Image (cartoon, grey):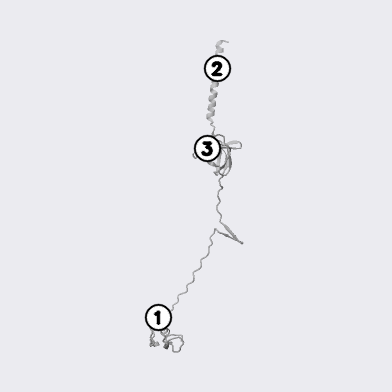
Amino acid sequence: MSKRYYLFLTIFITLTVVSIAVFLPVSQAQSATSTPRPTRTPRQTPQTYYVIGNTINARSCPRTTCEVVTTFSRGRSIRVLATVTGSSVSGSTNWYETRYNARRIYVHSSLVSQTRPSSTSSPVQPTRTTSGSNTTNTAQATNVPAAPPAPVPPTENVSVAPPAASYSCNCSKTCEQMASCEEAYFQLNQCGCSRRDNDGDGVPCESICSGG
């Protein structure tokens, strides 16, 4: 073969080797930038955290757009292996890395706590006290019927004697001169006019006072 052919072949081989040497690092760099890995903090001792939400999502990467691998319910404990930086949720970019079925999964830091959450409080039941065979529910008020009002006796028409001040003592007055039986009793009892009761039965002026 001619020297020209060998020269052409040598140039072709040289260009091919140079192209491979340049292209390979560039493709590796592009591959590395297309699938960024989460930024990890320095290795830390695994710590136990507890789920504080009712149900939370554990994802395949520390971003809210990543696949949901599983869910954890309230009070579930998880072992946090590392803190990583991911998408922001409630103003925080901290996510916690843990493992599930030998797979790395991530939960946002706002959904877990190192303090175990308390269970949902149940409504308070009324206190019941037992005395012998009778059980009393103290939450219920005891209704005691009010005592009926005392009966009011009907008003009777009773003749009321005129006040004593309207009479004056005058033993010289006769029964016929008395204004009423009450005046006769006044003359007998208050003034001592014994002549008003001649028969001594305590009833004066029997002509105007009955009962004598």
Query: Pointers 3 and 2 in contact (CB under 8 A)?
Result: no
Residue 99, position as x, y percentages in the image: 59, 37
Residue carrying label 1? 164
Q: Are marks 1 and 3 in contact (CB under 8 Å)?
A: no
Q: Quadrant of residue 40?
A: top right
- Which residue is drawn at the image coordinates 55% and 13% (left, top)? 7
Mark 3 nearby-residue class (10 Å; few <14, some 14–19, many ≥20):
some
- C-alpha span from label 1 to label 3: 107 Å
Q: Which of the two discs, 1 and 2, sits closer to the camera?
A: 1
Q: Which residue is mark 2?
A: 14
Image quarter in which the N terminus is found: top right
Residue at left offset 54%, top offset 29%: 32
Dot 1 lies on which element?
Answer: helix
Q: Amino acid at mark 1?
A: Ala
Task: Examine the rendered structure and indicate whether residue 122 appears above or below residue 185.
Answer: above
Amino acid type, mark 3 = Asn
Rendering coords of residue 131 (x, y %): 60, 61
Q: Circle 3 sits in a helix, a strand or a loop, which is it?
A: strand
| C-alpha distance separating marks 3 and 2 | 51 Å
Residue closest to the eye, 71 or 42:
42
Residue 163 x %, y % = 40, 79
Structural crowding at the residue carrying mark 1, measured as other residues with C-alpha within 10 Å and reported as few (<14), some (14–19) or many (≥20)? few
Above or below, 122 relative to 72: below
Is 168 located above or below residue 124 in the figure? below
Element under disc 2: helix
Residue underneath mark 3: 94
Nearest the viewer among 37 and 50 is: 50
